[in-house]
Image (cartoon, rainbow, N blue to C red):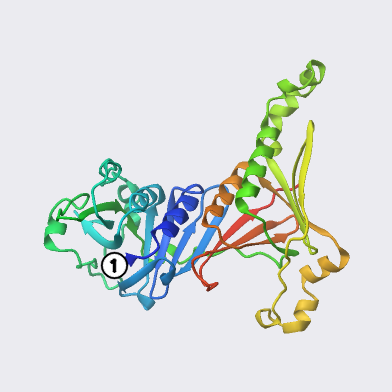
Amino acid sequence: MRFKASIQNISTFTKLTASLSSLGKEAWIRLDDEHVRFTVIPEQGSQVWAVLSRDAIFETYIIESAAQSNVINLRVPLAHLHRALRSALTASSASIRLTKKDNIPLLSLTITTNSLSSRAASIPTTYNNNAASEHPEDTATRGIDGREEYDEFAEPSERDGDPGYFMGVSDRETTITQSIPVVVLAAVTVANIHEPKCRDPDVHIILPSLLQLKAISERFTKLALAPSSTLPTTRRNQSCESDVASLGSHSRLMLAANGHGGLKIGVETPNLKIESRWEGLTNPELDPGQVEGGEEAVREHASTKMREVGGWATVRVEGRDWGRVLGVGRLGGRVIACFCHDHALILYVYLTNTDSEESALTYYIASYSA
């Protein structure tokens, strides 16, 4: 089992891991010949299924395994991966490889800088992650045919020494390696993990700036969760008990969109009702070539009928979880929202550094009942 790649877009990779780490502690990373997939499925909250062409992040790319398409499945601690990538933002070059030490699989990030900055030197280079020991059944240190399969790219001096940190100083360059303990997942472990299925969306709409939406959403959530001490005394006494009982529902935001470029976001509690609106947004047209049934299916599609009647598709989401999702706006790409009325909201986030729509993050956000 081998994996080694040079990173050509450290900034995008770092922003991606920052967005994912806000939703979950660990990610399932699936590597194969053509794509890099990131999946985050927290116990509560939104799921993320990201599919990136390997060229969106990596330049040279070598992968080998006994599985079909050279698939390698890893469970990776996102905070540690993000911290290591962040230290590489000013590097002149960076590469990543799968190796091991003391029978523990490691993702080793090696960066080259022109000089050793105090910031880079202060970052811990070996993370004491207990992922492998916490899930001994998933360690899967052997390949499909039962043989141990790990990267042999590392030089003996790297494998035999401390993989967490070494420096090679020349006249102008400094090399730093940071190693992150990971878990190699057997194919059977992930065989039954599938992307959620939703019915046909009622509205497709291209969202405005996610950073703008995030600022408004966080302000609305704070207002909804504000203590009732701002109310008159008599009303405060009457509402105190009900406010405590319904605190969770008060943090839920209402999002709605129609087929004529309209978008609404708001919050409503017994003490507050506030809403923001956008007009003139774009509703992408369905491509008959991409819809099973062609033009006839497009005419009968739920979004076509919703546009004809001028209706609104509405979902209700937990405000704080929605705010974390909107953190993906740091990637700056185009975002298409698909509203399934009273059921779910699906976001497709496309990367800005590639013209291909192969690279996209898909967020699945369940709707609460009214």
Residue 22 rendering spot, x and y as whole percentages: 50, 47
Give the residue at the far top of this rendering: 233
Rendered residue at 80%/76% (across/down): 300
Q: How many marks?
A: 1
Residue 105 rendering spot, x and y as whole percentages: 27, 57
User: Is 360 or 330 nearer to us in this picture?
Assistant: 330
Quarter-of-image position of residue 228: top right
Q: Which residue is mark 1?
A: 4
User: Is 367 or 287 nearer to us in this picture?
Assistant: 287
Say what secondary structure mark 1 lies in: strand
User: Which quadrant is the N terminus positioned in?
Assistant: bottom left
Decide if residue 349 is on the left or right side of residue 1: right
**Would you place residue 62 above or below residue 185 in this image?**
below
Q: Residues within 10 Å of mark 1 (few under 14, many from 20)?
A: many
Residue 74 rendering spot, x and y as whole percentages: 37, 60
Decide if residue 205 is on the left or right side of residue 38: right
Rendered residue at 23%/52% (across/down): 176
Rendered residue at 36%/64% (across/down): 186
Quarter-of-image position of residue 250: top right
User: Is 110 or 201 nearer to us in this picture?
Assistant: 110
- Identify the amino acid type marked 1: Lys
Give the residue at the far right of this rendering: 309
**Would you place residue 323 above or below residue 231 in this image?**
below
Rendered residue at 24%/68% (across/down): 149
